[in-house]
Amino acid sequence: MNCLAGRPPVALLLMKADQLNGHVDALLLAALRDGPRHGYAVMEALRASTGGRRRCYALTGAGEDALCRRRAGKRDFAAVMGAALEGTPWPNPS
């Protein structure tokens, strides 16, 4: 089951997730050093400070599987909460 069917492809940067910890925060802080900015201005400041270089990320097969599981878990959670709020049994016997 491909949860991302029809989504545009994204290039892959081979980097472990734990190597990214703290980098995004540092980049955002640097972009805000000169004062407050809205989202688009933050992106532009980051582009300017990095010479336009970007890192591109993509889901691996394992990441796609994890996303599918999380989506299913969120759907189940929403269904359970809805049933509890409506006072109906879960799972719905119908």
Image (tube, rainbow, N blue to C red):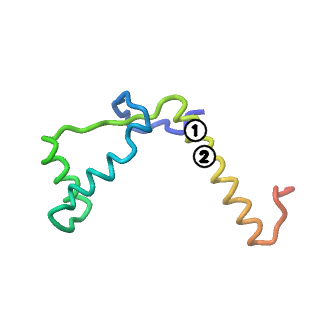
Residue 26 versus residue 46: which sits nearer the camera? 26
How far is the residue under mark 1 from the one under mark 2?
Answer: 6 Å
Q: Position of residue 21 (x, y in %)?
A: 40, 44
Give me the disc on residue 79: none
Q: Residues within 10 Å of mark 1 (few under 14, many from 20)?
A: few
Could you say where residue 33 lies in the image, as x and y percent from the top left?
A: 18, 61
Vertical order, 36 against 30 (above or below): below
Nearer-the-camera pick, 30 or 89: 30
Asked if the residue under mark 2 is in contact with the one under mark 1, i.e. CB atoms within 8 Å, the reply is yes
- The three-letter amino acid code for the residue at tag 1 is Ala
Query: Mark 2 highlights which residue?
Result: 70
Is 34 rendered above or below residue 8?
Answer: below
Q: Position of residue 31 (x, y in %)?
A: 20, 56
Q: Secondary structure at mark 1?
A: helix
Q: What amino acid is found at the position of numbered circle 2 in the picture?
A: Arg
Which of the image's four quarters has the C terminus?
Answer: bottom right
26 relative to 31 in the view: left or right = right
Query: What residue would you read off at disc 1?
Result: 66
Residue furthest right in the image: 93
Would residue 43 appear left or right of 25 to someone viewing this image?
left
Q: Is residue 93 above or below residue 68?
A: below
- Residue pictured at 38% horizontal, 33% vertical: 9
- At 68% from the left and 57% from the top, the residue drawn is 77
Judge left or right: residue 51 versus residue 78: left
Which residue occupies 82% across, 67% down? Answer: 88
